[in-house]
Image (cartoon, rainbow, N blue to C red):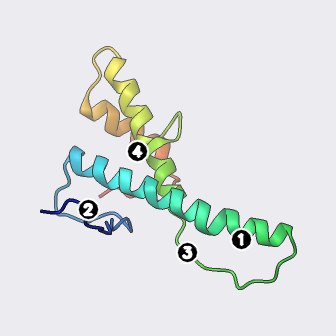
Amino acid sequence: NCKGMKSIGILDIFGFEIFEHNSFEQLCINFTNEMLQQHFNKHTFKLEQAMYTAEGIQFDAIDFIDNQPMLDLITKKPHGVLPLLDEELVVPKGSDKGFLQKLVMKQAKNVVFKRQ
């Protein structure tokens, strides 16, 4: 009987998992985890360090991996993966090939976008 017992839950939210083949569902899980990580980074590192700087408090800056460029690749309008996918779904005769062509064209200069 666990009623009344205290517990601690831990969620590992660092980094995308790498599988040989990722499903759309796995992308959604990883993306959600990355959004949680970004929220944590923003409130724990970015905003705190900005406040310390604004108040003239001396501190040792903490280096951390900022995953915002990856989140932008997926969500930023109008050329992120999900906005382009939404667009392709409503285009007459939209297709996987059309989606891929648009994605490659729009993201070609993005340093976090890699085509294999």
> Residue 113 appears at what percent x and percent y?
43, 55
Q: Is residue 6 or residue 58 the one in the foreground?
A: 6
Please tell me which of labels 3 and 1 falls first in the chain: 1
Residue neighbourhood size for the residue with mark 1, other residues' Cα within 10 Å, grouped as few (<14), some (14–19), many (≥20): some
> Residue 64 appears at what percent x and percent y?
55, 75
Query: Where is residue 24, by image quadrant?
Result: top left
Query: Where is residue 34, by image quadrant?
Result: bottom left
Q: CA distance from mark 3 to mark 4?
A: 29 Å
> Residue 12 appears at what percent x and percent y?
33, 68
Q: Is residue 103 left or right of residue 78?
A: left
What's under tag 4, amino acid-wise? Val
Q: CA distance from mark 4 to mark 1?
A: 36 Å
Please tell me which of labels 3 and 2 falls first in the chain: 2
Q: Which residue is mark 2?
A: 4
Q: Which residue is mark 1?
A: 49
Q: Which residue is mark 3?
A: 64
Extreme-right residue of the structure? 56
Residue at position x 53%, y 35% in the image: 77
